[in-house]
Amino acid sequence: MKKSATPGNGICEVRNKKIFHDYFVGEMFEAGIVLLGPEVKSLRAGHAQIGDSFVRANRNGELFLYNANIAEYKFCEPNEYNCTRPRKLLLHFSEIRKLLFAMEREKMLILPLKIFFKHGLVKVNIAICKGKKLFDKRETLKKKEARREAERAIASRRNSNIS
């Protein structure tokens, strides 16, 4: 998980980078999320983790984000606060139908990729994912290393031509 924040803007982005290593990522959706005021302030400060979080539907067909850890805002009054409570996701009905179909029929997972701010609102990028096997992970690492090696060769060739 990576947190990147720019000091002046108060813009924060919480990412789960292990998703691309552990899962095949399919179609992505941008969803709103229902939060309390102190949770938004805590997100702006970058105090959140989504490494173990996932999305599930309830009986009414509403989607909820589970296990997203948004820490209690330290300047808020102390009260009973559950930092991993389920949080409702806001999507269009057609998007919810696609996600429910993927979860129920195709046995896919819905996982959050990142939480970010867009025009002052908190958004969550979620994706339909399928788990990778060990040999798939190794293959991905080999491809990544080959790409890096090719980029290094191109960069060294450019540097030698410039001199």
Image: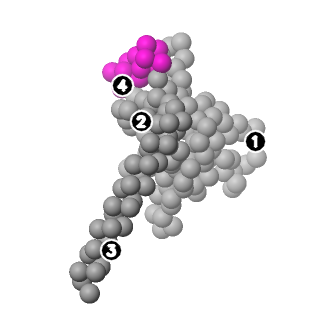
Task: Determine the secondary structure under disc 1.
Answer: loop
Task: Determine the secondary structure under disc 3.
Answer: helix
Query: Which marked residue is nearer to the observer: mark 2 or mark 3?
Result: 3
Q: Earlier in the sequence, mark 3 or mark 4?
A: 4
Reading the image, the residue beneath label 2 is: 25
Are the two marked residues, 4 and 1, in contact with CB atoms closer than 8 angstroms? no
Q: CA distance from mark 2 to mark 4?
A: 16 Å
Q: CA distance from mark 1 to mark 2?
A: 38 Å
Specify whether residue 149 is in view. Answer: yes
Q: Is residue 100 magenta?
A: yes
Q: Is residue 114 magenta?
A: no
Reading the image, the residue beneath label 4 is: 95
Reading the image, the residue beneath label 3 is: 156
- Specify the amino acid type for callout 4: Glu
Locate residue 95, reporting x and y percent.
Answer: 36, 25
Reading the image, the residue beneath label 1 is: 79
